Amino acid sequence: MTAWISVLVHTPAHARMEPVLTYRHTEPLPNGTLVRVPLGKRETLGVVWHDAAAESSGELDGDKVRDIAGVLDTVAPLGDAWQQLMRFTAQYYQRSLGEVALAALPPQLRDLSPVQMHRRQRKSERAASKPSAVAEGPTESPAHVPTLTSEQASAVAEISAKEGPFLLFGATGSGKTEVYLHCVQSLLAQDPQAQALVMVPEINLTPQLEARFRERFAPLLGAQAVVSLHSGMTNPQRLAAWLAAHEGQARIVLGTRMAVFASMPHLRLIVVDEEHDPSYKSGEGARYSARDLAVYRGRLQNAKVVLGSATPSLESWHQSRPREDGGRYQRLLMPGRIGAQAQALPLVRRVDMKHQTRGAVFSVPLLDAIRACVARGEQSMVFLNRRGYAPVLHCADCGWKSECGHCSAYRVFHKLDRTLRCHHCGFTERVPRACPSCGNLDIAPLGKGTEQIEEQLEALLADVRRPDSASAEFPQGQAVRVARIDADSTRLKGSLQAQLAAVHAGDVDVLVGTQMIAKGHDFRRITLVAAINPDGALFSSDFRAPERLFSLLMQAAGRAGRDAALGKGSEVWIQTFEPAHPLYAALKQYDYPAFADSQLRERAQAGMPPFSHQALVRSEARSQEVAQAFLNAARSGALQDMAAWDGWDQVLAQVTLYSAVPMAIARVANVERAQMLVESPSRQALQRFLSGWQSVLHASRALPECKGLLRWAIDVDPLAI
Ligand code: ADP
Ligand code: ZN
Ligand code: ZN
């Protein structure tokens, strides 16, 4: 007997082939079955995809149809909900279904043959049935579970009683994680199959979360019940975790944005912690937002969705306005902080840099405060969002600057290894002895980076001695220890953890770093946090920059005063030329709602998201002319050709296409980049427009003026413009 099987594969985008191809097999196969199929000269993974809409049309030529090479029949077929999630993602983010679906599967699943897969599964089954693993099974003695505060209890009660989605708006330290743990626990207790997905922006930065979930649930459900899914895992680990989620043994999946695609047939709850974090948005391939997909997926699988943050994205904040005003999310408030942190929040102090020595990195009062902090034996954290020693090297004689030859950007001066490094293309050279253009020996750094902050602090604090550090060897006491954490200091695997451990152990007095150190870490002994130069975001052309700055500063402030004994005098310092700016005023009051409401008023007036919906088309070519020509051709194609299509004038009337412009950094690694913004007050209209526009974009590529176009891509709901 012969059966025709429709199989979804990842066909190369440039071939513009249908992603669902027909193969032959000896028997029918259920939808969602994983199969190996020949594609061109290679063999590849495919998913059986009998879908009326995608079914290839026309007569089948029996001689040309190829046989399915193998069936991964030890893996259960992927469910309808998972398939629908893939369909939606591909459609919404304007990518091919084959690419989206196959990329959502763990890499090893794509590579292993049925026999290898079977062997792999047998091995992990044997491992799971070993006595040692059984000993890790349920012990019926759950870890200590704190009694919920009344705020927490009412949040948990609302989540269990209502439908959601929920926006849990709670300060750092208000006990949001404890709410997640309770929701997961009550859900898993109700239904012996139920699964929960808990997402965090960067799992490497939050091993605490994993530890808390394991500690709570391993005793109840066994160690196998909690798995992680993130890019820091090896491929075999990822496959094993994915299979455990797919087969239902894993009851709790903790992961980064990629986990939103995990196959979880019994999914009943999705938590998105720090839901405002930009890393939920993918920067490559299908540029999906895992937070937004979580909300969609919740509806699809009838799972509750809880988004949590101390500084929600303005989109989520707006969605959670009162129902009568059109809000669709349920807002839950937890304003109080718990225990040690319940005392006053750190005092926010603004230093007016207009009254300080010009060019000084540290204002006098901040430096005094850091010295006093060290002298008390407490820790401070100083952050600046720029790594390296100085962003530019400069010759005062002839005006030479350390431009990158391949990018429209300056190379950054790294003093430690005496290099000039381009942070966009990676091009690195030794620092020249003299100005390459006029020979002047006196070339100087311009501006400041974390290396320089570290160096200056070491010098400025050289005379300070740590309290109680005097010994026979150091009769005067020991010097202050300054450490730096940024992408440069943490390049080696494991080095971030080691450096964080040193801070926790108290081996560091002053920690310098980029925003990496502001996020999530639970530093107990830090009582002073300082932002050296955060003003840039106030005047950025990116309309989301203030939102990101506010949330970063709130998060950084949350690092200070976490220890009860030390918390009282905690301070957050902002060095600024705009001390009266409303953003800093709201920060001083820790008043996120005031900040959000003023931002939303501005956005409403300017017709920006969330009051409009956007997509960006980006193009890359060897020349800026070609990159822009492509976008402009696609634009006139939309305005002329599409306007003639039947019924499309309605859609076009709701969509604005702006002109093509170079990207902020127009050239990277000798590739010129341009972009075009598409905007509409209606999400639906934008979606319809984009799906129709695809064919125009593809056709534009063939035009003579677009010769040399390298690639183009659509970014729906872009985060940076
Ligand atoms: P968030 O996730 O909002 O930052 P956490 O859930 O991590 O807050 O809680 C902050 C601290 O308070 C943690 O150390 C946590 O163990 C503790 N905590 C949370 N809820 C309670 C509670 N109900 N009783 C006592 N301690 C709690
Ligand atoms: Zn010069
Ligand atoms: Zn470069």
Image (cartoon, grey):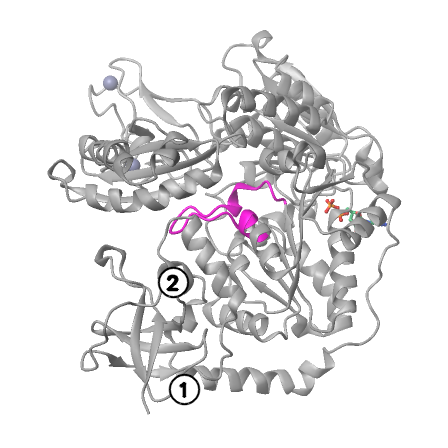
Q: Quadrant of ligand 3?
A: top left
> Which region is colored magenta?
274-294
* Amino acid bearing label 1: Val
Q: Can you tell which mark lies on residue 115?
A: 1
Left or right of residue 233: residue 70: left
**One can see residue 146 in this view:** yes
The one nearer the camera, 444 or 690, is: 690
Q: CA distance from mark 1 to mark 2?
A: 33 Å
Of tags 1 and 2, the one toward the viewer is 2
Identify the residue at horizontal 49%, vertical 31% (top origin).
612
Q: Is residue 413 visible?
A: no
Crowd class of label 2 (few under 14; some 14 to 19; many from 20; radius 10 Å):
few
> In the orientation shown, which residue stands out farthest toward the top?
355
The extreme front residue here reads 646
The N terminus is located in which quarter?
bottom left
Is residue 284 magenta-colored? yes
Indicate which disc residue 53 carries: 2
Among the 4 quarters of the image, the one containing residue 443: top left
